[in-house]
Image (cartoon, rainbow, N blue to C red):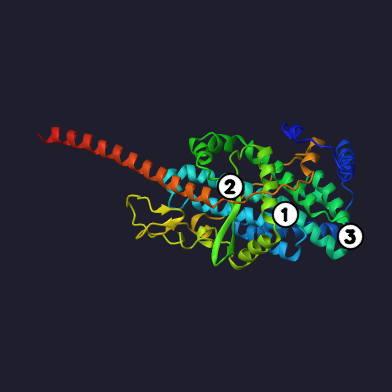
Amino acid sequence: MIFPFIHKFKKPLPESLIRLRKELKKKSQGSVKKSKLSPYENELIRQIQSRTSQLNKNNVTRTKAYLYFFLRFPEIHWAFLGHMVSRNGGWNMTDLKGALLSRLLTKKEAHAFFTFLERGNWLIFQDAFVQFLIYEESVKSRKALFHLLPYFGVSIFMETIWNDFWNSKDCYLLTMALVINEQSYLESRVLNNPVFQEKVFNTLEFMLQDLLSMNHILFPFAADGHIKLTGQTLHHFENLHERILLGKRLYAVLFGNKDRLEAVKSWAMQHPHTGSRKDYWPHLFSEIENELPGRRLNPRIRDCNLLPGSSKIYSPKLEFAWKDQLQKPAEAGDWYQSEDVIHYLIKTNHNVDGEIKNDYCRTLERLELAAAAKEAFLFRNEGAAYSDDSRIVDRHLS
């Protein structure tokens, strides 16, 4: 994996990262040799594969697994970051069957978008969670077992990072490494996949998604008796560099303020993930469809509140929106090619403004207007077609 933008951010590496770079260079230059496994190690691999597969059924089971792991091992910050980002993935999935996007996309387009989101969500979990379970077993046995990671197809990059974390306990470095790893892991398997390129990235709807700033990552939390939002927005999802930088910003938003972190964690523990946006804003969203079939869409959202007399926005639970999908095995191959990636691990102490509510509210309003405009356009065309058909019938009857 080549990182063409990293030269803009190159700074002198601290001693700890120079040591990591040397270790990675040594590993990448030599062939990775898998040692003969003991019966215990073979059984451990089988158990981890089975457990990961059981938890990787859908977005809800994955998201819950991330949270439970973090509560047991709070030093693994990515587990909670992954939990909150995975919640957003689930909301994006159910949006495709919700009140607004279902009016903008055809069923075929919605299914293509869901397949894209689900594949990425599934791939990240099956790669990241086996790493977590190896760490859990290492803690139990009080012995590093990260030499087993290659048996799960995990990059030599992460094997090196985990061994370093075992000694250094550097939570920031491990989190950033996992951000880099998971986004790089997706790059060739999803982002550069010809099917997704054709059916998702090259569609007008995907460009519309970026135009309407629909790529909001929201972290809800309770404050002053209300549910507030913090987070970030990604405009160029197809750009690996931008996704890695987003991960760094999201980490700063979530872990940069201890009080806010505790508030987000408290909210997450009190609100099990269902996939419906009702989870965080029940005043605006409903998991029940209240609109009558065929009824014209009228604007009803203003400043993230409903206009008087308006029904709530339909946002279904994941279990009612999409069936569980059978996934083919992850594509083989190690993304790690260039030691330049080490520069992403340099710690930054920038404060990141997580203000996102205003942008998110405007996005909802724009989406509603776009859906209403498309509906009106189709209505006018259908009316014109009906008028033409009537004239043909009249000529036949005369």
Circles 1 and 3, Cβ within 8 Å, touching? The answer is no
Disc 2/disc 3 C-alpha distance (Å): 36 Å
- The one nearer the camera, 60 or 239, is 239
**246 displayed left or right of 396:** right
Residue receiving disc 2: 117
Please give the count of numbered marks on the rendered protein: 3
Residue 238 can be seen, yes or no: yes
Viewer-nearest of labels 2 and 1?
A: 1
Viewer-nearest of labels 1 and 3?
A: 1
Mark 1 element type = helix
Mark 2 Cα shell of 10 Å, populated few (<14), some (14-19), many (≥20)? some
Q: Quadrant of the N terminus?
A: top right
**As drawn, 28 above or below 364:** above
Residue 238 spot, x, y in % from top left: 62, 37
Residue receiving disc 3: 143
Residue drawn at x 88%, y 57% is 38
**As drawn, 161 above or below 197:** below
Residue 40 spot, x, y in % from top left: 86, 61
Residue drawn at x 58%, y 44% is 116
Type of amino acid at the residue the image marks with label 3: Lys
Mark 3 element type = loop
Residue receiving disc 1: 78
Q: Quadrant of the C terminus?
A: top left
Disc 2/disc 1 C-alpha distance (Å): 20 Å
